[in-house]
Amino acid sequence: MTFPLVATTLYGLEEVLARELSEIGASDIVMLNRAVKYRGDLAVLYKSNLYLRTALKVLKPIAEFKARNEQELYDGVKQIKWDEFISPHHTIAVDGTTYSDTFKHSKYVALKTKDAIVDQFREKFNVRPSVDVDNPDLQVNMHIAEILCTVSLDSSGSHLGKRGYRQEQVLAPISETMAAGIILLSEWDKKSDFLDPMCGSGTFPIEAAMIATNTAPGNLRHFAFEKWKDFDPALWKSIKEESEKRVIPFTGKISGRDSDEMAVRISRNNAARAGVNSIVKFEINDFFKNEAQTENCLIVMNPPYGERLNEEDEMIPFYKEIGTKLKHFYMGCDAWIISGNTDAIKFVGLKPSRKLRLFNGPIECKLHKFQMYRGSKRGGNEI
Ligand SMILES: C[S@@+](CC[C@H](N)C(=O)[O-])C[C@H]1O[C@@H](n2cnc3c(N)ncnc32)[C@H](O)[C@@H]1O
């Protein structure tokens, strides 16, 4: 039996997520803004959490109604038979998102929703479920678009970018979801060399190694659906076992470099936790001082964007130097650069063959693709 599902994502990754969903057997896939809706059965729901690299949360809508005021919102939530999902001794948490002139405050919407659930239990059983925001038995999501309220069960729990391997990080790391999204957008063939020359916590190389080996991004963590009343442990076990069988060896070269010794140490530890330390090589290396010629490599990087105090003024020459370095030492390579400094990235000085606008959390970013051709090729960057 299939039912509707919604996977949320970051702005700009909707298409990649839709592609990922089609690969795990989802049907009726429709792209929305920062989300993709689709249909699937319990297996697709479990696989969505385990396999999707670019989803933040997988939501299961259970009710939809219109509300023109608070009372109608409260009444709508109270119509739902909550004891189908939890018992009175269970704990709940509610979060809300609202894009509405009537309901302006998401926290208030969440509070009203929670009140309606709790009141229903009190009236029916004389006991009320408690709230546990950190580790609830049931996480409920209320989404309001103008007057249309959608109540969903959050099957993921903490967002899916929290794979579990990144327990240490540098200042301003890129989210795992964004890193995986960019690698998938780059259409890397999973064979040619992969390099992040300013790797920070190692997110890009680690995500690349997981993609290249078919390692499920969720294999280290737990999900909220494991506490649901309808949880099917046998089905979940078989899906997990199947995911382990899908892992394939990788013989190519994935490298991460950083001029900061601590970043390299952090990257190595993170890669070990992700189980890809035998695949990714990390080294201390200053991008600008490296004189080796690199060819036919996919470069993905997220240079500093001026996140440190007093760094802002240095950013334009820094990005200019990146462009010069790429042009002279990385022939035949494609470089994808994502930066939260939307001005400085223009100073790379090479002609981008693709330009995308993305959001890393609240930070607007530009993702530019540069192709360093050897010889003549129109539109690229001749060496
Ligand atoms: C924004 S952080 C990268 C974050 C990374 N993508 C992550 O997920 O953690 C930028 C990194 O560039 C490194 N860096 C700055 N200048 C460098 C240089 N000349 N050579 C190599 N790495 C450099 C910094 O040490 C820092 O770790």
Image (cartoon, grey):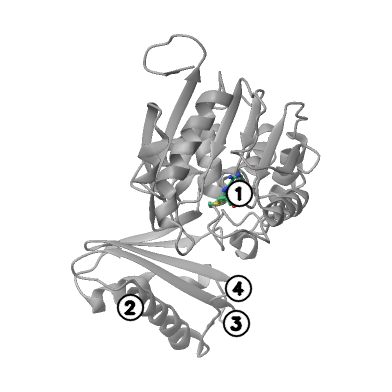
Q: Secondary structure at mark 4?
A: loop
Residue at 22 percent of width and 61 percent of height: 146
Q: Is mark 2 within 8 Å of ligand 1?
A: no
The image shows residue 182, relative to residue 233, as above or below, that is above
Under mark 4, the amino acid is Asn
Rate crowding at label 2 as few (under 14), some (14 to 19) or many (20 or more) other CA atoms within 10 Å: some
Q: Is residue 262 left or right of residue 150?
A: right
The residue beneath circle 3 is 89
The residue beneath circle 2 is 108
For the residues labelled 3 and 2, the Cα–Cα distance comes to 24 Å
The residue beneath circle 4 is 135
Given residues 240 and 255, the one toward you in this image is 255
Q: Quadrant of residue 51?
A: top right
Q: Secondary structure at mark 1?
A: helix
Given residues 86 and 319, the one toward you in this image is 319
Task: Verify CB contact (< 8 Å) between mark 1 and mark 4.
Answer: no
Task: Verify CB contact (< 8 Å) between mark 3 and mark 2.
Answer: no
